[in-house]
Amino acid sequence: MKLFGPMSRREMLTLCATSATGLAIPPFSSATLMAKDNPLLPETNPEALGLDPRKLEKAYDLLQSWTQGANAPVPGGAILVGRHGKTVAPRFFGKQGPEANSEPLRTDAMFYLASVTKPIIYTCGMILVERGLLNLSDKVSRYLPEFTGKNKEATQVLHLFTHTSGLADELPNNADLRKQHAPLSSFVSEALKSEAAFQPGTRQSYSSLATILVAEIVQRLGKMSIREFVKKEIIDPLDLKSSGLGSQGFDRNRLVRCTVPEYQAGSDFSWNSKYWQEFGSPAGGMFSNPGDLAVVCALMLNQGKGIKGQLLSPATVRMMTSNRLEEMPEMPEAIRRTQPWGLGWKLNHLGHSDSWGDLLDRKVFGHSGSSGNLVWMNPATGGFCILLTNYLRSRAPWRLVHLSNIIASSFLP
C-alpha cells in the first residue's frame, strides 16, 4: 500500500483481501516515523511482497522499545525490508545522536555505514575486472609494487577480496594517524608496509587494510580518487541521492551521530568529527540512508541490473555472492565450510558468534558495520533486510541478530 498518494487498484484489492482474512495491516505506532521523500524503489504493503505484517510489527516494536527512555541502549535506528525490487516504507526510531538532548531521528537521516562501506569498494574493483584492467589471480605486487615483506610475496588480489591475505584489521598506529588528521595516502602507505601474519589463502582474518589496498588499486587503475570512482561508477548510475564516500556536499545536520568506541571519546577524530566524516575511508567511511541501500540490495538480487540498466554482469554478481574460499586448496575445510566469503560480500556464518541470524542459511550475503548496521540479501526469497542504528555494535551484537531473526521469519512462500 502506498503511504502517500493514491493506491492502485491492485493495492486496494490486496488491502481489502487481507482485511477479510484477518491479516489487516497493523496500525503504525505514533512513536515511529516513515520517510516522506520519493523512494527510488516502489513501496507497497507487506502482504503484496509476501511478508507477514504482524512479524514486521514485532521487529518495529522491539527497536522502538530499545530507543525509548533516558538510558535507551540504542539511541536511534531505522528498518527497511524489501523483496523483488519493492519495499515496505522504512521506519525510523529514536534520536539522531547518543546525547541526552539529541533531536529526534530525521526521516532524511544519513547513517554512518562503517564496514558496510567495504562491499561498495570491492564492487569498484569488480568493475575494473569486467573492463579487463584487473585480474584477481594476479599478485598484488603487479599493481602495487611497494607491497613487499614477510608472507606477502604470493598474495593475490583475490586474497584481499576474501580477507585471506594475513593482513591485520587496523594499523598499529591507526589512532595516531587519526589524531594527526592524516590523509588517505598516509593510511595507504602504512598498509603497503604492514606485515602479514600468515601465508595467503591458508587462514581467514578480517582486514580493513586489505580493503584500503583494493581502493588504492582502483585509484591507480581508474586514474581518479576512490571517492570520485564510487560516485561516477556506482552512486550516479544508481541515482543515489543520499549516499557518498565521505560527507562532502551534504548537510551535516542530516548525519546520524554514533556511539563511539572509548578511544575516540572526546576526540576530534571520532566517527562524529568533521575530519572523519569527510575523510571517506574506503574501509568504513560511507554515509547513506535505507532507501539508497535498498537500491544496492535490489541490484545484487537482480543479477546486476539497476534502475537505469545493467551495472554489473550476472557473472560478476554470481562470483561476488558465492563462497570463493572453495578454490583455495590450502584453506582448512572447517573455515571453508563454516565461514564463507564472496568477493567483498560476506556470506552468513551460521553457527558462529558473528552470524546474522538463525533463520538465514550460508547463501545469504551481506555485511555488518561496527556503528550498529546490518544489511543482508537472500537469493532464495528475493528478499533483503536493512538495519541501520547508531549504537556500538560490539557492546551487544545480539540486538541486530534478534531483529534479523524476526524479519527473516516474516518472509512467506
Image (spheres, rainbow, N blue to C red):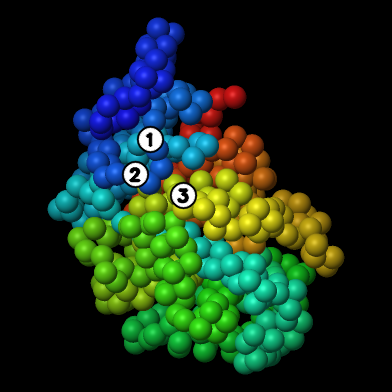
Q: Which residue is mark 1?
A: 43
Q: Residue furthest right?
A: 329
Q: Nearer the viewer, residue 106 or 127?
A: 127
Neighbourhood count class around disc 2 (C-alpha, 10 Å): few under 14, some 14–19, many 20 upward:
some
Q: Quadrant of the C terminus?
A: top right
Numbered circle sitting on residue 39: 2
Q: Secondary structure at mark 1?
A: loop
Where residue 307 appears, as percent x and y from the top left, is: 46, 49
Q: Mark 3 is on which residue type? A: Ile
Numbered circle sitting on residue 307: 3
Spatial separation of the CA atoms under disc 3 and disc 1: 14 Å
Q: Are marks 1 and 2 in contact (CB under 8 Å)?
A: yes
Neighbourhood count class around disc 1 (C-alpha, 10 Å): few under 14, some 14–19, many 20 upward:
many
Spatial separation of the CA atoms under disc 1 and disc 2: 7 Å
Residue drawn at (59%, 89%) of the image = 193
Q: Nearer the viewer, mark 3 or mark 1?
A: 3
